Image (cartoon, rainbow, N blue to C red):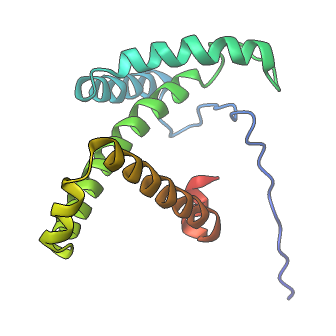
Amino acid sequence: MSATTTTTTVDWSRPPEWQPKPGRARPVLVGALTLAIFLAALAIRSNLVFGLALLALVFVPMERIWSLHPQKVFRTGWRTDLVHFAVNNLLTTAGLVAVVVLAGGALHAAVPGAVRGAVASQPLWLQAVEALAFAEVVQYWAHRAAHAVPLLWRFHK
C-alpha cells in the first residue's frame, strides 16, 4: 500500500457558495444567529456603526473602481463579511485590552521606579515618539512571526 499526498488549492478571492445540506441548520436559523451575533457585538461596541459606515464610504467606491473581480456590494456572503468585521473588531479590542493590562502590570513590576520616573519626566511629544517607535518594532516582529510560525500563519493567511 502506498500513501499518496493530495493538495487542495483554495481560491481565497471568492467566497464559497453555501448550500444547505440535510441535517444542517436552516438558512433562517443561520440568519437569526448571524443577526444575534452582530447585535451583541453592536451592543458591546457602540461605535461599530460609525466604523461600518466609514469603511463603506471608503472601500465601496474603491472596490467599484479598482476591483480585481467585479462583484455586487450586496453579494452572496456579505453578511458573513459584516459579522466577521463586527466580531473581529470586538475580539481584537478585548484581546488588546487584556494584553495591555497584563503587559503593563508585568512591565511596571519589572522596570525600576527610577526609569519610570525618567520617562515620565520627558516631554509628552518625546514619549509619544518613543511609544510609536516601540509599537512599530513590536508590530514588525509580530507580523514576521505570523509568517514564520505555522499556527500563526493559519490565522494570518
Count of numbered badges drawn on the protein: 0
Dividing the picture into quarters, in which one does residue 105 lie? Answer: bottom left
Q: Would residue 47 appear left or right of 102 to someone viewing this image?
A: right
At x 64%, y 31%, the residue is 19
Question: 26 or 86: nearer the eye?
Answer: 86
* Image location (x, y in percent) of residue 53: 46, 12
- Up-down relation of residue 125 to residue 35 (above or below): below
Q: Residue 38's x, y, as percent?
A: 36, 25
Query: Which residue is pictured at 15% across the width and 62% down the height?
Result: 117
Q: Which residue is pictured at 60% across the width and 59% down the height?
A: 154
Q: Quadrant of the N terminus?
A: bottom right
Q: Examine the rendered structure and indicate whether residue 70 appears above or below residue 130.
A: above
Judge whether 44 appears above or below 2 on screen: above
Q: Which residue lies most toward the bottom here?
A: 1
Residue closest to the eye, 80 or 129: 129
44, above or below 128, in the image? above
Q: Position of residue 44 (x, y in %)?
A: 23, 29
Picture quadrant where residue 141 is located: bottom right
User: Going by the image, does 51 lie left or right of 3?
Assistant: left
Residue 44 vs residue 114, the one in the foreground: 114
Q: Residue at x 52, y 23 (%)?
A: 79
| Residue 56 on image: x %, y % | 55, 14
